[in-house]
Amino acid sequence: MKQALAGIRVLDLTRVLAGPFATMILGDLGAEIVKIERPVTGDDARHFGPYIKEESAYFMSINRNKKSITLNLKNEEGKHIFKELVKDADIVIENFKATTMGNLGLGYEDLKKINPRIIYAASSGFGHTGPYSDRPAYDAIVQAMGGIMSITGAKNGEPTRVGSSLGDIIAGMYTVIGVLAALRYREEEGVGQKVDISMLDGQVSILENAIARYFVNKESPKPEGNKHNSIVPFEAFSTIDGEIMVAAGNNNLWRKLCDSLGLNQLADDERFKTNPLRAKNYYELRPYLANQFAKKTTSEWHKILVAKGVPSGPINNIEAVVNDPQVKAREMIVEIDHPIAGKVKMAGLPIKLSESKATIRAPSPQLGEHTEIVLSEVLGLNYKEITKLKDKGII
Amino acid sequence: MKQALAGIRVLDLTRVLAGPFATMILGDLGAEIVKIERPVTGDDARHFGPYIKEESAYFMSINRNKKSITLNLKNEEGKHIFKELVKDADIVIENFKATTMGNLGLGYEDLKKINPRIIYAASSGFGHTGPYSDRPAYDAIVQAMGGIMSITGAKNGEPTRVGSSLGDIIAGMYTVIGVLAALRYREEEGVGQKVDISMLDGQVSILENAIARYFVNKESPKPEGNKHNSIVPFEAFSTIDGEIMVAAGNNNLWRKLCDSLGLNQLADDERFKTNPLRAKNYYELRPYLANQFAKKTTSEWHKILVAKGVPSGPINNIEAVVNDPQVKAREMIVEIDHPIAGKVKMAGLPIKLSESKATIRAPSPQLGEHTEIVLSEVLGLNYKEITKLKDKGII
């Protein structure tokens, strides 16, 4: 079975998360990812904990399916080698500050002269245009500046950071979309282009109805805890042993929920007949439901609600997630054999394609593991030339 | 300027958020989106607040660049019309429960017989395989079951829902990636395929280092508030008038931060020289920094830190986000002229392409606005035939 991106070569200059997350997806889909790392130290994420036998579990989890070569891009000979690689590549991806590649003489304007079909994707904190374009950023900064924190948190509580690096992840996903759209354009028109992704832009794009609410009400929405801001009931309820999330998104589900709880009289109660009424009379309604949910365990209620077709679920911790039968059935936790760390578990591939299945073909590479093979196979360098580059610290 | 997805026709059966978010991105990139809605009521999201002159601001914000036709897919003649449309389409996208389309005789297995080049993307709560595949879900359910809530919240606090519908949005983005990968595969191999996206899978894929930490430490990570779990300093500090997020992700930035705060002696302090030391001696370190940050306003500190190159930013509410100079410069808030609602503001396009710019070409459609034109232009139906379908309630 051929993969969707078979035959596509990506020169991957990215480090840490946003860029590597993008090239991981492209690699999973079958592209050849040539990760180009700084000699000696490599990608910063190689030095992020937690570790398994001196290998970063973090690095391993987002760098599968990649080759690694070392190359010093500040050195003229290093730049020359990079440019030679660009001639034979489809895509360059980097997540440096906006000015870095241009200052090295390796920006899109430079590279397109060498290969007009090259697709150049840059993922940066604030994008390559605008007044903040030269500022550095990390996930926490764009989560703060992008507004998602201001609508996340306990009801009327403090703004809260999303517990994973959403700023990077969203930017990484848009980078993939941009690159694939540019590939389609190249297929049609024969030329590459630049894809300019900003972590801050990405955060703004996922604010969902908060933007509409602001412009209609002229007031910034606040954290709402675990309750939906307009649909009722759509929130977590306490049970004997924990909590259960329940989402009755329409009147049909509302009736099923009442039935599940043994509260059929509520379904016909005039105060609660429609969602606008349930929202209006929320404080009258909630105690009826809370009272029932307090009588059984989360798992007992979940079984009842599932049987009646009411969307519901436990609030799983990571242990429950990785052991969940559906997560297992969908192969969303995979195990990779790493030559040093041994068997390593990580998130699987969320894009399930029937004809060109995404696959994991290799563990994350050791720093520079593929330098020699790439330089000899792609550029035709011989053993002596490669040794010389090594001696000079260029690779 | 031609758009990246010009010439691609999408039959869009999606409702509410996950699917419409995906087809919005495809439409922004230039695909023709034919939104197929239930007659009379249409997409549920048309009835979600807030409203501007009886138009849902929510619906408008995720359905720009789409045509709308009405079609009753439960009716045999309606099914026939849909199948005729499939013959001339590139992509079908739906976000029903897993069994819905198959039960209607319109699943991928049915449609590929009509058009083997069709790409069929399904975005559902739990995916089309596995033990939960027939269960309904909403965003809150998959946020709860997928683990993101368990790592989001105040330090040692309650699990907290992300304040926008991340379960839908991530699934929508993976749907786009899957569809574009399938398009590339079709370009090479000549056949379509099925793209099966699960909201729960998507949530598992964005847990980032929480999975690695669980498998290494055998303990489920907990909410960490606004502080990074391993990098120091990387958190929010109180100022005279609010808070500022600061992220000193390496030793170089640590020195710059000390300099900005007038605490150069700390940069050389043996207790804080490296990130592992700063993490270990966090409770000794924090008061020095907190003490300084308390002396100026957020905006004063932000200016100083920006000048020194230390990643930092205010925790913006939505009002601050939509008025931010960078957000404006990147056109991340756009205004569309809607025939009924008037000027409507919404999030812009985060995928910036140099050659095939994504654009907003039309406001969200009225229900069935394009029924006649699509049926006449694509299927060649005449006025009389269309009137008959209307009379029968099929369109």
Image (tube, coloured by chain):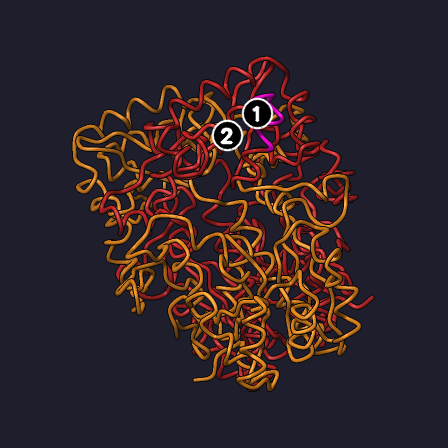
Chain colours: A red, B orange
Under mark 1, the amino acid is: Asn
Residue B34 against residue A235 in the figure, above or below: below
The quadrant holding residue A307 is: top right
Residue B339 is covered by the magenta coloring: no
The disc label shown at residue A264, or none: 1
Report if residue B235 is visible in the image: yes
Discs 2 and 1 lie in a common subunit: yes
CB under 8 Å between discs 2 and 1: yes
User: From the image, which quarter does the C terminus of chain B lie in?
Assistant: bottom right
Q: Which residue is mark 2?
A: A268
The quadrant holding residue A382 is: bottom right
Residue A262 is covered by the magenta coloring: yes
**Magenta region:** A256-264
Q: Residue at x 22, y 31 (%)?
A: B239
> Which secondary structure is most common in the magenta stretch?
helix
Q: Position of residue A376 (x, y in %)?
A: 73, 71
User: In what element is the residue under mark 2?
Assistant: loop
The disc label shown at residue A117, or none: none
User: In what element is the residue under mark 1?
Assistant: helix
Report if residue A32 is visible in the image: no
Q: Position of residue A365 (x, y in %)?
A: 69, 52
Cα distance, mark 2 to mark 1? 7 Å
- How many other residues sit within 10 Å of disc 2, few (<14), some (14-19) or many (≥20)? few
Nearer to us in this view, B130 or B177: B130
Horizontally, residue B120 falls left or right of residue B240, namely right
Q: Chain letter for mark 2, please.
A: A
Q: Residue at x 75, y 55 (%)?
A: B103
